Image (cartoon, grey):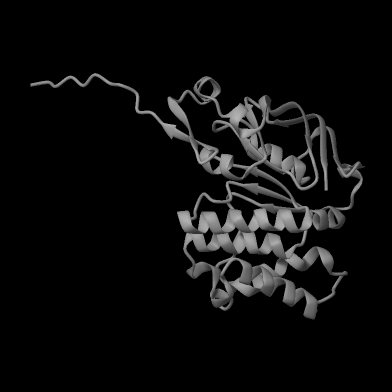
Amino acid sequence: MSIEVENLTVVLGERAAVDGIDLEVAEGEWLAVIGPNGAGKTTLLRALAGLVPFSGRIALDGRDAWALHRTELSRLVAVVPQDPSTPPWMTVAEYVLLGRTPHLGRLAKEGTRDREVAAGALARLDLLGYRDRLLGTLSGGERQRVVVARALAQEARIVLLDEPTAALDIGHQQQALELLDVLRSESGLTLVAAMHDLTLAAQYADRMVLLDAGRIVADGPPRDVLTEALIAAHYEAAIHVVDVDGRIAVVPSRASRVVQETR
């Protein structure tokens, strides 16, 4: 499912957190949204999900998002937030099953297929052994995997992810991102992910947009966006960009310092 954004603006308080963005995301594309803290990454995702008021236009497969009923929008778009609400008294199985809510009629209960889809999402993220665990007993990384499983159970065609690997160890980072990439290949899933880890973003994303002060300042393949000049200008960071087996990695470069000893 494609996404089209025209002149998108989101005002929070007196500040434009997203300021006149134009953007297109093709069906099946993985777009990484990068930028320094406060650049507008999370606000952009929230606007795409219909969670904040905005001006401008957002279209999903040519249909204006504002014209879609909330339930219909939830069938099309799943969100993996950075700080999800995970009730500590709820079991993992119950929480992931909530991903099926957009597919249920009013007052309807989950059926056999709903439970099968939820179980499949748990299996894909190696969580079947956790299904009876309470969310309050899980580590941060385990909870993050459960949140991703709930999004997969939703069977949406667009998945918006806000720092999806922030709480995961390196093994589960790879597992989660590889799974998303497989689903993208198998079903044309469209992914938009806000990511701080620039190297991970470069490994998986087809394309990147660099935001700063709510505006797009660079848009293109990772190799074109992750340049030492752009990162220095917008992150105020010293880095080296290196080639690793045909893909790029961003390596921080420790700035030289003069240390004076006082005696």
Q: Is residue 237 above or below residue 170?
A: above
- Extreme residue toward the bottom, this view: 112
Q: Is residue 252 above or below residue 205?
A: above
Quadrant occupied by the C terminus: top left
Q: For this rendering, which residue is in front, 35 or 177? A: 177
- Extreme residue toward the left, this view: 263
Residue 178 position within the rendered picture, expressed as x and y whole percent measured from the top left: 60, 55
Residue 158 position within the rendered picture, expressed as x and y whole percent measured from the top left: 76, 51
Q: Is residue 168 above or below residue 9?
A: below
The residue sitting at 59% across, 53% down in the picture is 177
Residue 84 can be seen, yes or no? no
The residue sitting at 77% across, 74% down in the picture is 114
Residue 129 position within the rendered picture, expressed as x and y whole percent measured from the top left: 54, 77
The residue sitting at 54% across, 74% down in the picture is 130
Residue 198 position within the rendered picture, expressed as x and y whole percent measured from the top left: 53, 37
Left or right of 263? Residue 204 is right
Residue 117 can be seen, yes or no? yes
Q: For this rendering, which residue is in front, 262 or 28? A: 28
Q: Which image quadrant for residue 209?
A: top right
The total of numbered circles placed on residues is: 0
- Extreme residue toward the front, this view: 245
